[in-house]
Amino acid sequence: MAKILIAKVGVDAHDMGVTVVTRWLGEAGHEVRYLGLYNSPARVAEAAREFKPDVIGLSFHGAEPVYMSARVVGEMKERGLESTPLVVGGVITPEMAAELKALGVKAIFTPGTAREAILDGITTVLTGDRRNAPPGQRLDPR
Amino acid sequence: MSAENFKPNDPNADNEGSMSDPKLFDRYIEGERPLDFKTLSGLPLEASYGPGPAPLAEKPGEYPFTRGIHAEMYRKRFWTRRQQSGYGTPQESNGRLLFLLKAGMTGLNIDYDVPTKVALDPDHPLAEGDVGMVGTSVATQEDVEALYAGIPLEKVSSTLICQPPASAFIVASYVLMAEKRGIPPEQLIGTIMNCGFTQLVGPTYQSNTTFYPIEFTYRIGLDVMEYCARAMPKWNLVNVNAYNIRETGVNAVEEAAFAMMVASQHIEGLLARGLDIDSFAPRMAFFTAAHIDFFEEIAKLRAMRRIWATMLRERYGAKSDRACWFRTAIQTAALALTAQQPMNNMVRAGLQTLAAVLGGAQSIHTTGWDEAFALPTEDSHKLSIRTQQVIAYESNVTKTVDPLGGSYFVEALTERIEREILALMDEMRAKGGYLKLFKERWIEDRITAGRFDLNDRIDSGKLPLVGVNCFQDEDEKPPEMKFFRIGRPMIEDRIRYIRDYRKARDNAAVGRALEAVAAAAGGNANVTPSVFDAVKAKATLGEIGEAFRKGIGHSLPV
């Protein structure tokens, strides 16, 4: 099971999706820390340094996901944390999804994604990224 | 639909009436039928209904207005076609407003971006990714003038989607702009949403307590209402946002009961200030959701009219009928729309719009079919207007009032949902009222329970969502349609604009005006006069918001 950091970035406060997904991930046995609303990109990166998550999830409804995710990636790089995979969920157009992928975002979950698909997606991100890690550090997909 | 479309059966799950139930295939032989006999909010539904104990003798336009607030309703005047709009700069949004008015929109409905709503200027570090994103960016009186350029304010009614304390700035800027054009405040027609409990994203706790304490937000809301009650007799001074309550994931009963209790909180605040109920209650209004359960939504609206009328007359002693009119704008619920097979949303929105009309709405926003992805494009915005025009001009449902009145079922469902709403309101009153319950996170806990329940029902297939948990397209690809998108240069433009604006004014005068705002915020007097003075001195919205915080000793958690 993984450590997952989840946050809303900026001033958009639509949080139904993020609270539901946070609960689903917790129920699946992951150790989840949800930072709540109104985080600056720097605050997310700081929380990552402290919590050392295996994956970071950002949720967007109204803000510009590409710009905000890029800012988070930048803040992570400044702290040498760029190897932590980033996933994004929320109201995201296909065009934005392509840009997020180009930015290095590992998975994108749009509205209506089923619980199983989210859990599987997170597992794939984790195992994918850790495939070449020493055996003791690989994550058990289940 | 094929077997592959269904999720594998979980042997541990309760599959009674679930779309993931493999027994469902047996129903192809038996014929398809509903998965249960309940409304979306869980009210039981009988196979058929007969006459109730007392048939409804009430006529439309008669107290308690179950059948509508006017005797003639849409025979005399259609609902207002009031589409929310707003994005980017005020100049860009002005262009969209003129486009929509030309397409047949009959009332304005301006949405501001989140930084504006929480009183941050575009160059505030927390605002950087949200400027102009889900509404238009407004920070100065000049911005407000640009937004409404070329629009006759005394002829077209205008809804301003903004909550306190930013609503004080928005009202001041609007009134001062009108005065510049020679239109006095008493001639202005429209609405300031101005509800500090519901407007931002509904009544979730953190969203409503971060930028200002809830008591302060509530008080400034009352300050603005008091100003409007005295100076703007044709203006709606608050619009309780039941829609946003509903969109957090709660059910129709909670939507209605919470909204009524919020309205009660505002009423009691104004009464405590010595205002007469008949001087302000006629200018209070609501904004409700039309979700996908057709009859439940119609029954909800009919029940809300009856509850409001009875509450105003019996609890608050309103004499005028106008004070007892439950007037509501309606938005077709975006929560009912899906990102999967998005064209299905056109059908959903059509049904929801019809429910709003049969429920007796005063104005309607039909949500765009592409809004599970982005703000609507011009084409999708126009389709929303056309949807309403087809219902208004072609379907003939407008030619008789409350056509469902007297239906055994609709009257029984109206009574049933009314009973549920009243019981929840009684419970909330007994527990100390809305503000207290909000602060104790009782409201938050209800929302959390509601949204988890809703999502579990969708995920388990118990609540069918066509294209999402049933009738999925096996090879669904991202839709190849044009989505609305706002570019980064707009944000840079806004930041440059606000910095230049601050350089080109008498900063000593601005400083003095802001001191007065801070002093008013820290004291007990109405803040609106000091906000008017600050706007005249060219203070920005963000500066006024900061002065509020200074006055009450509140800081941002950044």
Image: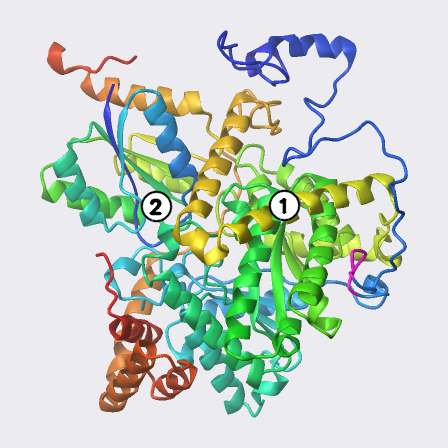
In percent of width and height, residue B97 lies at 57, 68
Above or below — where is B160 with respect to B204?
A: below
Residue at the image point whose x is 24% and y is 69% from the top:
B553
Q: Is residue B303 in sight in this rendering?
A: yes
Mark 1: amino acid = Ala
Above or below — where is B436 with respect to B144?
A: above
Q: Which residues are magenta?
A: B64-69
Q: Residue furthest front?
A: B430
In percent of width and height, residue B348 lies at 67, 40
Q: Which quadrant is the C terminus of chain B positioned in?
A: bottom left
Q: Nearer the viewer, residue B102 or B148?
A: B148
Q: Nearer the viewer, residue B350 or B256?
A: B256
Give the colour scheme of this rendering.
rainbow
Residue at the image point whose x is 19% and y is 47% from the top:
A43
Residue at the image point whose x is 84% and y is 68% from the top:
B76
In percent of width and height, residue B358 lies at 78, 51
| Mark 1 vs mark 2: in front | 1
What secondary structure do most residues of the magenta stretch adopt?
loop
Q: Which mark is residue B423?
A: 1
Answer whether residue B475 is magenta in the image.
Answer: no
Q: Which residue is mark 2?
A: A65
Above or below — where is B494 with respect to A21?
A: below
Q: Which quadrant is the N terminus of chain B positioned in?
A: top right
